[in-house]
Image: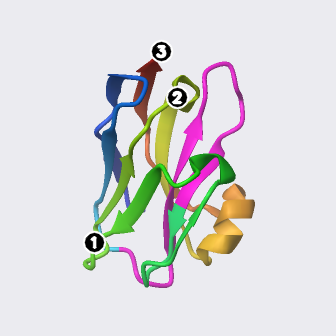
Amino acid sequence: QVELGESGGGSVQSGGSLRLSCASGSPYPSTYSMGWFRQRPEKEEREAVALADGDGTAVYADFVQGRFTIFRDSAGNRLYLQMTSLKPEDSGTYFCAAAPVPSQMFLRFRQVADTWGRGTRVTVSS
């Protein structure tokens, strides 16, 4: 099974920026969508943040409101999430995941993921 490893988390003040990276042990085919999910403190559910298809088409959760940008490298090895204008409610553990379905389906049904990373922690202070 392909492994995913996240990095780039950290602590920032409200309004700050972070760039998360996800490295794959092997390239993902373009038929896979890849994305970022997060689990906020004291929440059990992981919520979708941003997802991208192999052709670069991206979908975002409503709460992103233009603040984040997801992009994949052409080789299929890396996924990034550029986060700006961070808010305290963006704090949580961010996970990278991949699924053999289009991003629109992955956005709605996170259970279709066949690979998850271990997460990277983001803390935004007010």
Estimate the spatial distance between the alpha carbons at disc 3 and disc 2, rounded to whole Å: 14 Å
Q: Is residue 45 magenta?
A: yes
Q: Which residue is mark 1?
A: 73
Sequence-earlier tag: 3 or 2: 2
Bin the neighbour count of mark 3 within 10 Å (Cα to Cα): few under 14, some 14-19, many 20 and up: few
Residue type of the residue flagged with mark 3: Ser
What's the magenta region?
28-50
In the drawing, what numbered circle is on residue 15? none
Q: Position of residue 24 (x, y in %)?
A: 31, 60
Q: Is residue 11 above or below residue 65?
A: above
Q: Secondary structure at mark 3?
A: loop
In the visual, does 44 lie left or right of 80? right
Estimate the spatial distance between the alpha carbons at disc 1 and disc 3, rounded to whole Å: 33 Å
Residue type of the residue flagged with mark 2: Gly
x 43%, y 22%: residue: 123
Q: Which residue is mark 3?
A: 126
Sequence-earlier tag: 1 or 2: 1
- Front tag of 1 and 3: 3
- Identify the image quadrant of the N terminus: bottom left
Q: Position of residue 103 (x, y in %)?
A: 60, 72
Residue type of the residue flagged with mark 1: Asp
Q: Is residue 37 above or below residue 109?
A: above
